[in-house]
Image (cartoon, grey):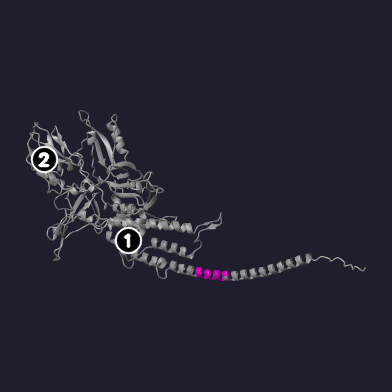
Amino acid sequence: LEIVDLTSGSGAFSVSNGVGSEVATQLGLTESASGDTISGRRLVSGLKTTLLHSLGGGSGLGTLGSITLTNRSGASASVDLASAETLDEVIDAINRAGLGLRAQYNSSRNGLQLVDTTGANASNLIAADGDPTGTATKLGLAASVDGNVLQGSGLNRQVVNRNTLLAEYGTGSGVSLGTFQILDSAGQSATVNLKFLEATTIGDVIDAINGLSLGVEAQINDAGDGIVLVDTAGGSGRLTVSDIGSGRTAADLRIAGAATDVEVDNQTQQVINGSTAYRVTLAEDETLDDLVQKINALGAKVSAGVLSQGSGSLAYRLSLSSGISGKAGELLIDGSELGFSFQELAPAQDALVQLGTGPAATLFSSATNRWDNIVDGLNVTLAGTSTDPVTMSISLTGNGAADALQTFVDNYNKLRDKLGTYTQFNPDAGTKGTLFGSQETLRLDTELSRLITGRYFGVGNVQSLAELGVSLDDTGKLSFDKNKFQARYAADPEGVVEYFTDETNGFAAKADAVLERLVGRDGSALVNRAQVLSRQVEDFTDRIATWDGRLERQRERLLNDFYRIELIVSRIRNNMTAVSQIQALPPFYSSGN
């Protein structure tokens, strides 16, 4: 990209990242302006090379300078790599140094190696930093070896970034959209539901995790091959990620489990590294067969085997095959710690087909050698390769119509099953289906059966579905003979097409008319029935409301009667209490008597 300042001002021209964003940096647009222009860095490497800024897990190798090389004869030269943007440009610059050194990708294809072709052995083969930027170290080549091959270390080419699709993540099977729980070291937990969030990329997952109120930070790991979670809560517990229920979203993201302690900037932090790389550890007493078993047990869509040549120092070889077709099945293998080197026998690549010639030509790629609907209704399967133009003869086949007929048969049989369930009657139990005795279901059954078994005239040589392999058994279900259909189509394709597509008498027109009468939006049998039932429901609802009102008034009247009776009973009780307290008075005597 290039940004040009079109104003006439004299102030500084700059581009910076937005809040929480590194887009400008990733595009190389944060460099100083040259006059009124800022030119971004290269964004596309090419078909068979790698951009330097995609190495180091995606953080890049930084600014390169020069590298000093010494061949086995003792001759040295300095190679300037400051302008290199891809690994191929680094390789070409070294190969042009005139030292008899050949730079190439190492056997693991995750870094570089130097091969001395001089035939001399007076000196070690040496690659050293040629300036303070540490260029040889950054390229993994800083070493001195007593041999003709200097094997470079891995450069961690980024294979996962924020835009990586969840559907293509990991070994190609993708990430299931479910729910997982994160528990930080302080004991706080929260869940992430990728289905609810409608997540589509790894960036969506990272943003969802970082948006939680937890002491956890998510980002792309340093190797650029997965997500890493770093606990920032500083608690005494253990950072843990687990799937909810039977889901496996966290497992697919490779972050399920408990954190391990890792030194980060001289501090011990709890980290869950969701690297998509698979690692196999082999003990000293284990054999090549043990290694094969361990690889096959990884579940990594890679199959391992042993090739036997019968004799010699290399009688047995390890063979690895990808279980994913196309470019997505490329294997990146580093067996240097075991002393293994690998040779690629068949490169992982997508099939390519160019449609047309000249500026308007279109290039199509496929991982399966097949293109569906490359042109409307046209599927192409690649059976061989050619650099010369190929003329294809295209003829109509009945496969699409056969598939549509099979779908029609399957759906009709499902309808029959539903009708059987809802209209059933069990005389022993005295139970019946919801639609038992329904006139609408009887009409639906009758008219669809008549549609399927009917004969249609005036549409060519084909007059019924039976002639095309569709038959009705004694249970009312359909079956489809695809071979019979294809034979009839091969004999009379125009007649088959006319049978289905005639605007007046064709099967499609008849079926549309029947379905419109039965289930159409306006005035169909089921719509009318639904409207009748709806009005009945409304009438019953009104009647229920009326009776509820009556019952409420009756309830109030009875409550009032009860209250009055209770009041009378209370008064009688009070009177009885007063009467019970009346006592006879003693006689009175006068003193004169």
**Picture coordinates of residue 45 (x, y %)?**
17, 50
**Picture coordinates of residue 364 (x, y %)?**
20, 54
Q: How many marks?
A: 2
**Picture coordinates of residue 516 (x, y %)?**
39, 67
Q: Which residue is drawn at 42% across and 61% down?
A: 449
Residue 462 circle label: 1
**Circle 1 — which element?**
loop
Which is nearer the eye, 103 or 372? 103
Taking 529 as reference, is 30 above or below it? Answer: above
**Circle 2 — which element?**
strand
The amino acid marked with disc number 1 is Val
How many other residues sit within 10 Å of disc 2, few (<14), some (14-19) or many (≥20)? some
Nearer mark to the viewer, of 1 and 2: 2
Mark 1 in CB contact with mark 2 (< 8 angstroms) = no
The amino acid marked with disc number 2 is Thr
Q: Residue at x 73, y 67 (%)?
A: 574
State which region is magenta.
536-548
Locate residue 571 relative to residue 354 in the image: left or right. Answer: right
Q: Is residue 542 magenta?
A: yes
Q: Residue extending furthest right?
A: 593
**On the rendered image, what quadrant is the C terminus found in?**
bottom right
- Does residue 84 appear in this view? yes
Mark found first going from the N terminus, 1 or 2: 2
Q: Look at mark 2 in the image and give the residue it sits on.
A: 68
**On the rendered image, what quadrant is the N terminus found in?**
bottom left
Which is nearer the eye, 9 or 410? 9
Which is nearer the eye, 121 or 576? 576
Q: Which residue is drawn at 15% across and 63% down?
A: 11
